[in-house]
Amino acid sequence: MKTPTRTIDLAPGAEPETFANGEAYTLTPMVRLIAAEGKILTNGTATQPCVITGSSEGWTEVDAPDDDQRQKEAE
């Protein structure tokens, strides 16, 4: 849901009027992608375990880095 001042991720079955606070709003279908255990999602730029996006196109699952690799990247 998008109003002139904010964007709100609504759960299925939520009533937009409850969240609009009197503002005009538009509803845009979105998909929530959740990576499988041991995986992470990437579109070549962003890498994260969960994504809310207009389309699943361009997103793929890859193996998640292990803890040792994450620590090396943080240093």
Image (spheres, rainbow, N blue to C red):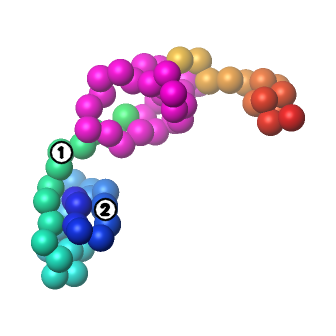
Residue kind at label 1, given as amino acid type: Pro
Secondary structure, mark 1, is loop
Image quadrant for the C terminus? Answer: top right
How many numbered dots are placed on residues in this image?
A: 2
* Vertical side of 24 occupied by 56: above or below: above
Q: Which residue lies furthest to the front in this view?
A: 4
- Residue at image mark 1: 29
How far apart are the alpha carbons under marks 2 and 1?
A: 12 Å
Residue appearing at x 31%, y 57% in the figure:
9
- Residue visible at 39% across and 24% down? 59
Magenta residues, start to end: 34-61
Residue named by callout 2: 8
Specify few, some or many for label 1: CA neighbours under 10 Å numbering under 14, 14-19, or 20 or more: few
Q: Which residue: 15% across, 66% down? A: 25
| Residue 11 screen position, x and y as percent | 27, 56
Task: Name which quarter of the figure residue 51 lies in.
Answer: top left
